[in-house]
Structure formats: structure tokens, C-alpha cells
Amino acid sequence: MNAWIVAACVLLPAGLGPCLWRACRGEPAQRLAGMSLAGVMAVAVFLLVARGVHRTSYVDVALVMAALTPAGTLVFARCLAGGSGQTPQQWRRAGDQGRG
Amino acid sequence: MNNSPGAVDFLVVTALVLVTVAATVAALTRDPVRQSVVLSVLGVCLALLFLVVQAPDVALSQLAVGTAVTPLLILLTVRKIRRGPGGSGDRGQGDDR
């Protein structure tokens, strides 16, 4: 019983539970905040578990998670912004007019 | 090597509870856009479960598929479907297939 895995035991329910609660309620754009924070909390739990069970190869999972979470958030933000009333043609037209 | 079985068991049970809650909410959500967000969180919880039962390669695959690819496919499909009768320029004869 080392301190790292105790910290993971505390952070898993206390960090991911409210994120899951936030991601399950409200509008899709509000759920996005819960999803993004859940990714960050998962990276922390991955690192704590890797340190706690003395397996350094588990750090690779945290690395992949940290690389994929901002990409997923960007994908969601782009798709949710495009899906709220405006068609992609209107989006592109507005962007072209904005550029001059 | 596993010098703390109680704490690891607690981690497994907690991850199982999180996966159960997320999967139930994902099954009960009707709107596909909201469902895709819940599915993404479900992918994160599943990756955590796979890691604490000592399957990090499965967790890597689950991260790559469940966090990025599946919600992206759902969102692109929803956008393609909603663009049809929405009045953009390139729609066909307006048949409601």
C-alpha cells in the first residue's frame, strides 16, 4: 500500500465522478467541458497507477491519452459549432468574407 | 510485485462503477450528439478499467478508438444527415430517405 495508489484511489472517484455527472447533463456544448476535464483527470490517474504498481510501461497510455484528449476536444468543438444552425457552406462563406 | 491488492481492487471496483454509470447513461440518451459526448467519457472510463486490470495495450486501443474515432464518426454522420433537408445548396430532389 503505497501513497501513489492511495492517491489514485482518491482521485478516481473524486475527479472522474463529477466529470461524468457534468458530461451527462445539459446541452452538448456544456457537456464538452466535462469531457475535457475527464481526459485530464484520466491522465493523472494513469500516471498515479503507473507509479503505484511500479510499471513504467503504463506511462505510455498516459502519453497517448494526453495527446488524444485535446484533439478530441477540438473535433467536438468544430463539429458542435458547425452543427448549431449553420451549414458548413455558410461557415466557409463567412470565413471567406472574414478573410477579405 | 502487486503489494497492495486492496487498493487495486478498490480501483477496479470504482472503474467498474464508472463504466456502468456511463454506459447506462449512453444507452438512455436519445439525442445522438449528446450521446457521442457520453460515449467519449465512456471510452475514457473503459481505458481506466483496462489499465487497472493490467491490460495496457487494450487500454491504448480503446483510447485510440473510443476517444477519438467513434464520436467523430457519429458527429460527422449527424451533420451529414441534418444537412440534407436543412436547405444547403447541394441537396438533391428532396426525397426523405
Image (cartoon, coloured by chain):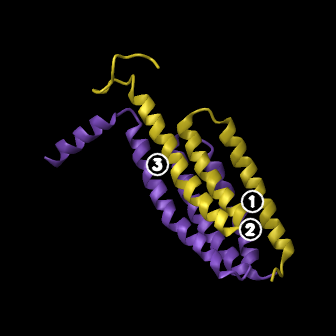
Chain colours: A purple, B yellow
Mark 3: few/some/many CA within 10 Å (<14, 14-19, 20+): many
- Earlier in the chain: of badge 2 and badge 1, it is 1
Residue A33: percent from left, percent from top:
52, 53
Residue at 76% x, 66% y is B53
Residue identified by numbered label 3: A76
Residue A8 vs residue B61: left or right? right
Mark 2: amino acid = Val
Residue under label 1: B15
Quarter holding the N terminus of chain B is bottom right
Q: Are marks 3 and 1 on the same chain?
A: no
Judge from the rendering whether residue A11 lies leftward or rightward of residue B1; answer left or right. left
Mark drawn on residue A39: none
Label 2 sits on residue: B52
- Which marked residue is nearer to the observer: mark 2 or mark 3? 2
Q: Position of residue A43 (x, y in %)?
A: 59, 68
Can residue A29 be seen?
A: no
Chain containing mark 3: A
